[in-house]
Image (cartoon, rainbow, N blue to C red):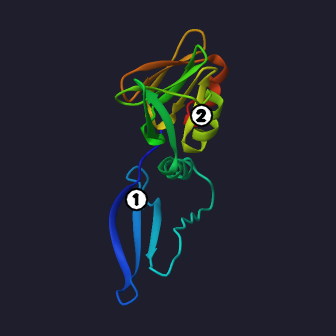
Amino acid sequence: MHRALFVHFSIIIGQDTSRGLAQKTILCYDKHKRGDHVKISMQIDGAYEETEILIRSPKLTPEIEQLIAALHLLERKITVTNGGETAVLDAAAIIYAESVDRKTFVYTQSACHETKLRLYELEELLEPCGFLRISKSCIVQVKMIRSLRTELDRRLRLTLETGEQIIVSRQYADALKQHLGVK
């Protein structure tokens, strides 16, 4: 699975308090690979009209894809109903979603909600956030996968961070393995 980056120290390069400008560089080291690091620079300036995130890298890596998915999760919300009450749910709270009897259900850590969105609409909305289709009737947030086990019929059994287990159909098993970097 993906490794997390660990921040070990930060260096403040410059600060101009008269303009409200602060520039900071943070070096993040992956403790599993010596010498690998990610440099994160921030410039906070009241003169900027909007927030911009710029990623510079020699190549697109799984870690960068994971970072982009996490950024997309911050801005996505969906409308759900539960017990007659309508609520707005952050996409980050969704563990998986499934379609049953022409209804779409969204599962979080604490509840099951229904949404008026079709599963394919939900998939289109959440795919940039790190969600992947695992069967004709289910999508899952990849970072919520704790482990997987191959079944006899080439299907996969996923164990989620909640301890719940769901099945990946044969049709989607290879794509999930490839996405996770599993052979």
User: Which corner quadrant holds the C terminus?
Assistant: top right
Q: Nearer the viewer, residue 31 or 117?
A: 117
Task: Please name the residue shown 52% across and 27% down the image.
Answer: 97
Rendered view: 57 above or below 123: below
Q: CA distance from mark 1 to mark 2?
A: 35 Å
**Which callout, 1 or 2, points to the residue nearer the camera?**
2
Query: From where the camera sits, is residue 146 visible?
Result: no
Specify the amino acid type for callout 1.
Tyr
> Residue 134, position in %: x, y?
59, 25
**In the displayed structure image, the side of residue 176 where residue 45 appears, left or right:** left
Q: Measured from the top left, where is residue 34 in percent x and y?
A: 42, 57
Report which residue position mark 1 lands on: 29
Q: Secondary structure at mark 2?
A: helix
Residue position for label 2 = 122
Q: Position of residue 156 (x, y in %)?
A: 54, 18
Horizontal relation, residue 31 to residue 114: left or right: left
How many marks the image carries: the answer is 2
How far across and how far down the image is residue 143, in percent?
46, 37
Determine if residue 76 is in view.
yes
Q: Are marks 1 and 2 in contact (CB under 8 Å)?
A: no
Residue type indicated by callout 2: Leu
Decide: few, some or many residues near mark 2? Use Cα within 10 Å; few <14, some 14-19, many ≥20.
some
At mark 1, the secondary structure is: strand
**Which class describes the residues within 10 Å of circle 1: few (<14), some (14-19), or many (20+)?**
some
Most extreme residue toward the top, as rendered?
A: 152
Residue visible at 63% across and 57% down in the picture: 59
Query: Can you tell which quarter of the image residue 172 is in?
Result: top right
Mark 1 / mark 2, whichever is N-terminal: 1
